[in-house]
Amino acid sequence: MNTDQEPRLLLVEDHADLGEATAEFLRSAGLEVRLASTGAEALTSAAVFCPDIVLCDLNLLDMTGVEIARVLRRHPAGRNTLFAIHTAGLREADIYTFEGDIPKGDVDLYLSKPMTMEKLDRLLAAFKSLRRSTTKGGTSPQ
């Protein structure tokens, strides 16, 4: 896990305009952001970039966000990465139902699109909680 002040975030979004807009929003909040547009690109980028947070679209052309999370969780560095699904496919009220369908440990947080300051605050609070638990010798909070 990155010990610098600001977290490194890998944004996985297959809609180019939305990806760029979201990346700029996140950068304006002080995060170091790398953008990937496919699952394969996300896996390659994660290996090199070593993100603290992965913010991933649910439905990509080559993989789902949950599949990407499962692959990343198999690697030691991925175990302490906060993994958040960011989707337009669910309304905020539907996210709680969807969370129950995914096994614990794959995904840490679900956020509906578009990204807002409130959602960014939730993402960063979850990251800070994860960082505190791993600093104390724990594992990802599930």
Image: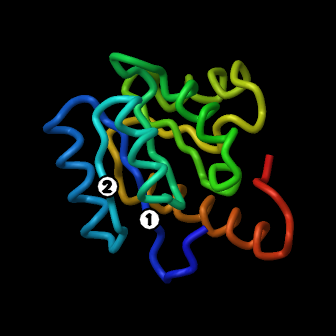
Looking at the image, residue 81 sits to the left or right of residue 140; the answer is: left
Give the residue displayed 35% in from the left and 47% down from the top. Answer: 115
Task: Give the image location of residue 23, x and y in percent.
Answer: 26, 54
> As rendered, which of 75 and 34 lies closer to the eye?
75
Location of residue 33 in the rendering, given as x and y in whole percent from the top left corner = 33, 60
Q: Out of 15 and 79, give the one closest to the viewer.
A: 79
For mark 1, what is the residue?
A: 8
The residue tagged 2 is 34
- How far across and down, in percent of the image, does residue 74 sit? 69, 39
Q: Which residue sits at x=45%, y=76%? A: 6
Residue 108: which quarter of the image? top right
Comparing 92 with 142, the one in front is 142
Disc 2 crowd rating (10 Å Cα; few below 14, some 14-19, many 20+) is: some
Q: Which mark is residue 135?
A: none
* Mark with earlier residue (2, 1): 1
Instruction: Tell me: residue 81, above or below residue 59.
Output: below
Q: How many marks?
A: 2
Residue 49: which quarter of the image?
bottom left
Q: Residue placed at 53% from the left, 31% from the top?
A: 68
Please state the horizontal and vertical placement of residue 119, each as a whole percent of the image. Answer: 45, 52
Q: Secondary structure at mark 2?
A: strand
Q: CA distance from mark 2 to mark 1?
A: 8 Å
Tell me which amino acid carries mark 2. Answer: Arg
The three-letter code of the residue at mark 1 reads Arg
Neighbours of disc 1 within 10 Å: few (<14), some (14-19), many (20+): many
Front-lying residue, 137 or 93: 137
- The secondary element bearing badge 1 is classed as strand
**Residue 83, relative to residue 40: is it above or below?**
below
Circle 2/circle 1 CB separation < 8 Å: yes
Instruction: Give the quarter of the figure containing the N terminus.
Output: bottom right
User: In the displayed image of the protein, which residue is found farthest to the right?
Assistant: 137
